[in-house]
Image (spheres, rainbow, N blue to C red):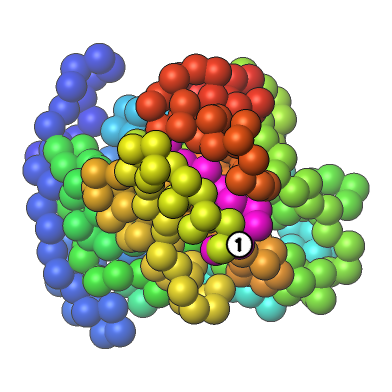
Amino acid sequence: MRGGPGPHDVPVTRRSEVVQIDPTDPPPEPIRRAAAVLRAGGLVAFPTETVYGLGAHARDRGAVAAIFRAKGRPSTDPLIVHVPTVAAARDVVADWPPLAGRLAEAFWPGPLTMVLPRGSDVPPEVAAGRATVAVRIPAHGVALALLAEAGVPVAAPSANRFGRVSPTTARHVVEELEGEFDLLLDAGPTTLGVESTVVDLTREVPEMLRPGGVTLEDLTAVIGEVRHRERAVTAPDEAASAPGELLRHYSPRTPMALVDGGGHLAEQLRRTLAARGVRVEVLDLPGDATEVARRLYATLRAADASGAELLLAPSFDPAGLGRAVNDRLYRAAHGRVVLDAAPGTVDRLEAAARRERPDGPTSGDHSVH
Ligand code: TXA
Ligand code: MG
């Protein structure tokens, strides 16, 4: 097969073939081919209901290493293992507590990832050396058919370069990773638009590490108390020991700020900065949280390509899916939050747009360089 993982340090250019596939009724032939590529140690990009993933055979160390290389992802950031059934999920974990059963019953297949004790035949590289493993059953016809046909657990991060905006269309995957995957199954845009919720069940009280498609309210309704640290960030050098999300994630290349005061404040800042000659774009995300989540990453990509020097994102009501949207905007903004249009705030934003430093109180400590 073309494009199997080469020896270490040898750059591999993979074929990056794109195959269109019907999401509701995926035909067997491309699914069989993609499954064979996975079993042979290749990399297959595939759709899920959240975002596109870059998949590899989770028990094949070489294939797993190839994912980290393809994304430029640090080996300290663990991957999610995707499986088609609860039985397959139980095969990759060392313990299946009652809470896991209840969550699986309520939300699988779906945008929920559970962190559980890692099974002994999942290589430590998948979990960045942790004693735990993240697992989920995606709710997407193509993903489920592929996972069932592959017959092996599939480790898959979002199919973007490390730290960048996640892909919600096949075109985004090609833009991000052409030459880095063997095959891409193109089933059109993903329906949910933000990643799965990650919940750690290995702690005394379950902790939501990443808000996503299954809301905190949904989780609490099924299992009771769930901890969540709002706007918690992990420094890169802590990533190996402390679970959580890095601050500079989901990032456009254009500097960005989250405006905690709504659309009017964002518009006022845009006008004030325009008077200083700064080209500002206010992200246009109308509609309810479901609609906003679906369009979020495409909007971020378009704004990034618009030639603006600064992006401003009004924050959302953190109820329901709005919590995940706010979380992604916060990280895309590298934790830069503004609350007013005072002269000091405008100066800070102008400096950020001009990429001067220092550009704000949270710009230094947790940055990924
Ligand atoms: O919706 C999704 O979850 C998508 C699709 C492709 O399934 N996948 C995805 O993967 O977003 P990725 O690699 O971009 O994000 C995985 C998240 C990271 O925040 C990682 O730190 C966390 O899950 N994670 C994975 N394994 C973990 C573990 N053992 N303990 C704590 N966090 C873990
Ligand atoms: Mg990701």
Q: Is residue 40 above or below residue 317?
A: above
Percent of width and height locating residue 56: 35, 45
Image point (19%, 57%), residue name: 171
- Looking at the image, is 158 positioned above or below residue 247? below
Frontmost residue, 336 versus 127: 336
Tell me residue 179's x, y (percent).
Answer: 14, 38
The magenta stretch is 255-263
Question: How many numbered circles are shown?
Answer: 1
Q: Specify the quadrant of the image occupied by residue 224.
A: bottom right
* Magenta highlight on residue 312: no
Q: Is residue 132 above or below residue 9?
A: below
Q: Look at the image and tell me whether residue 346 can be seen.
A: yes
Nearer-the-camera pick, 135 or 53: 53
Residue drawn at 57 percent across, 67 percent down: 213
Element at label 1: helix
Can residue 122 be seen here?
no
Is 365 or 306 nearer to us in this picture?
306
Question: Which residue is labeled 1 in the image?
Answer: 262
Q: Position of residue 118 (x, y in %)?
A: 65, 42
Q: Work out which quarter of the rendered image holds the N terminus and state it.
A: top left
